[in-house]
Amino acid sequence: MSTSTTPSPAAPALRHFLVDTDLTPAEQSEVLDLAQAMKADRFQHRPLAGPQTGIVFFDKTSTRTRVSFAAGIADLGGQPLIINPGDSQLGHKESIADTAQVLSRMVSVIVWRTFAQSGLQEMAEHSSVPVINALSDDYHPCQLLADLLTVREHKGHTEGLVMAYLGDAANNMANSYLLAGVTAGMHVRIAGPAGHLPEQGVVAAAEDRAAETGGSVLVTTDAMQALDGADVVVTDTWISMGQEDEKEARQSLFRDYAVDARAMSAAAQDAIFLHCLPAYRGFEVSAEVIDGPQSVVFDEAENRLHAQKALMAWLLYRSGLATAPDSAPGGAGVVPEPARR
């Protein structure tokens, strides 16, 4: 006599967020929907209740990232554990791979603000809990979730909007604006001086994603071409960590890409201005713009909290490490196996 058995359903795949395109367009929209719901009801979602621990490593200094992740983990019912440089053996006395395996047995999410993207990739390869890129030298994907949430709030949507980024475009912010912007269906224009533009590999990846969403990519040295009719105008500091000795040279190099009243007049009349902060008034942006009526930089800063909470919850739900409320955007019906702690 033969018998048959019904195979048990496969466990959900573990999800990480290391680069903007780790989320499909539909998934990015789910996270942003969830962020809007969380902003409206801050304590509805408690996937880290227990409290479970979320560990946040900082290899670089931070204000918004530190506070938003610490507050966000607490809001989700968890306990944040902040590790500063020199507080652990990560990367010098103990390998990233060993650290990932140890932490996975103790914490529910690993967040890392670091230098090399390769370190985050290695952490994710050996972790059995979600790993989140809180900033690397190559990408700043959590910032972009906050920016897109802000655009949604002020414009009602992202699809079809033109986003213009001006300044130092050979950095993590420009890379993430390209990738996340086109994932959201936006037309992303990047303007900076020759030699300070995104690498071709990032541009090609953005073009591939844009082909899926109806977005587009323009990389130019002409600031006015990028600004023409833009719905969203963005810049970033010209002087990143480690470049303080280059202040005068960089000010001269990027002067034509400053966002001032003249620049904003080339954008759409109802354009909004974004800056991830900290900002240097009189350098990359004038006080008239950042402190003016088109600036939404403090909404943007606040939205780091809501976007990152949504991201953490979404990763836990989709990885099968927590159960989403039926009312959660994109979360209804997610009934994972019990979380392993």
Image (spheres, rainbow, N blue to C red):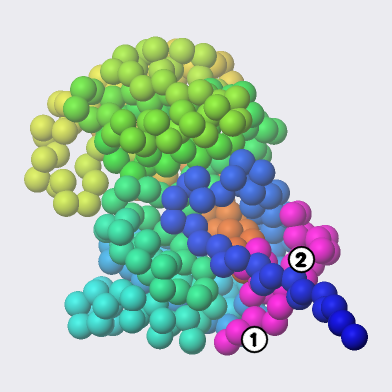
* Residue 97, x across and y down, in percent: 33, 76
The magenta stretch spans which residues? Answer: 317-341
Mark 2 Cα-neighbour bin, 10 Å: few <14, some 14–19, many ≥20: some
Task: Residue 288: name its quadrant.
Answer: top left
For this orientation, the residue located farthest to the right is 1
**Residue depicted at 66% across the width and 44% down the height:** 26
Q: Secondary structure under badge 2? A: loop
Mark 1 Cα-neighbour bin, 10 Å: few <14, some 14–19, many ≥20: few
Amino acid type, residue under disc 2 in the picture: Val
The residue identified by callout 1 is 50
Work out whether residue 230 or residue 131 is closer to the camera in this orientation and state it: 131
**Residue depicted at 52% across the width and 34% down the height:** 209
Q: Is residue 331 magenta?
A: yes
Task: Residue 223: name its quadrant.
Answer: top left
Amino acid type, residue under disc 1 in the picture: Gly
* Residue 98, x across and y down, in percent: 33, 81
